[in-house]
């Protein structure tokens, strides 16, 4: 059944993998369903603390550490109803795998490291993967590192392929403290921060009367 022609287009959240130096897009992962809730927490980077130095009490060392948590659903029901050939053969394995491989080094890199180790190389360099962006609408495009990842598979077909699952993601926003200013990720973080400042400027200012006072003593 077609949707009502006047209904707004539903945007989807998702992940995009890019080259941090050039900004070239390597992969786009759109979520099948948007999460019902999204939890964000900010850990403030203040200077003062144990020292009690009053000269440092109001200083900030840098952007706060922002963490994002969400839970997304993946469901093969609609595709199974139309007998989609891939879904009938492998269920939602591809949708799970495209998310999981974000946090894996590639098999080619592991094999290359194995070859270097076998040849006597003393230093094996960790893989530098693409930069992951979390996108949740045009005003929220942030570079992130995935810090938590869990999958609950809830239903299976007769071949034990998963056909319904929930994926819980925990992410930490990467700032210019992590990435620097001169790469694509740093620029995207600064655009994210500047967008916050622009939105804050649109907020209607409060009044002393709303607080029950006439001014600051």
Image (tube, rainbow, N blue to C red):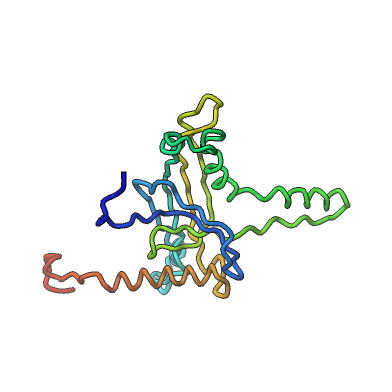
Horizontal side, residue 111 vs residue 52: left or right = right
**x, y percent for residue 143:** 50, 62
* Residue sitting at the far top: 158
Image quarter in which the N terminus is found: top left
The C terminus: image quadrant: bottom left
Vertical position of residue 103 compared to residue 45: above or below: above
Q: Looking at the picture, how far across and down is residue 90, in whole percent?
A: 56, 35
Q: Residue furthest right?
A: 119
**How far across and how far down the image is residue 89, in percent?**
56, 33
Left/right of residue 202 with respect to residue 136 in the rendered view: left
Q: Is residue 181 above or below residue 133?
A: below
How many numbered callouts? 0
Q: Nearest the camera: 140 or 216?
A: 140
Judge by depth and name the residue closer to the eye, 186 or 61: 186
Which residue appears at 55% of the width and 70% of the height? 184
In the image, residue 84 above or below residue 30: above
Q: Nearer the viewer, residue 112 or 147?
A: 112
Q: Taking the image as drawn, is residue 180 in sight? A: yes
Using residue 90 as the reference point, say whether residue 7 is left or right of it. left
Which of the pair 13/82 is nearer the observer?
82
Q: Residue at x 31, y 47 (%)?
A: 2
- Residue at the image point whose x is 45% and y is 38% from the top: 79
Asked if residue 157 lies left or right of residue 199, the reply is: right
Residue 217 makes an appearance in the image: no
């Amino acid at each position: 059944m077609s949707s009502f022609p006047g209904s707004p287009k539903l945007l989807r959240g998702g992940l995009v993998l890019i080259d941090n130096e050039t900004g070239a897009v390597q992969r786009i992962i759109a979520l099948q369903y948007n999460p019902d809730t999204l939890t964000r927490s900010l850990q403030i980077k203040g200077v003062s603390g144990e020292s009690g130095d009053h000269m440092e009490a109001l200083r900030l060392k840098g952007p706060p550490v922002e963490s994002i948590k969400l839970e997304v659903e993946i469901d093969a029901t609609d595709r199974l109803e139309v007998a989609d050939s891939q879904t009938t053969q492998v269920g939602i394995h591809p949708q799970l795998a495209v998310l999981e491989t974000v946090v894996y080094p590639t098999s080619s890199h592991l094999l290359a490291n194995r070859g270097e180790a076998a040849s006597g190389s003393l230093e094996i360099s960790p893989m530098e993967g693409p930069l992951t962006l979390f996108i949740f609408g045009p005003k929220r495009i942030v570079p992130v590192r995935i810090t938590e990842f869990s999958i609950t598979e809830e239903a299976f077909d007769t071949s034990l392929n998963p056909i319904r699952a929930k994926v819980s993601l925990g992410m930490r926003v990467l700032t210019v403290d992590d990435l620097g200013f001169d790469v694509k990720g740093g620029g995207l973080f600064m655009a994210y921060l500047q967008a916050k400042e622009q939105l804050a400027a649109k907020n209607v200012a409060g009044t002393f009367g709303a607080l029950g006072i006439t001014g600051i003593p």
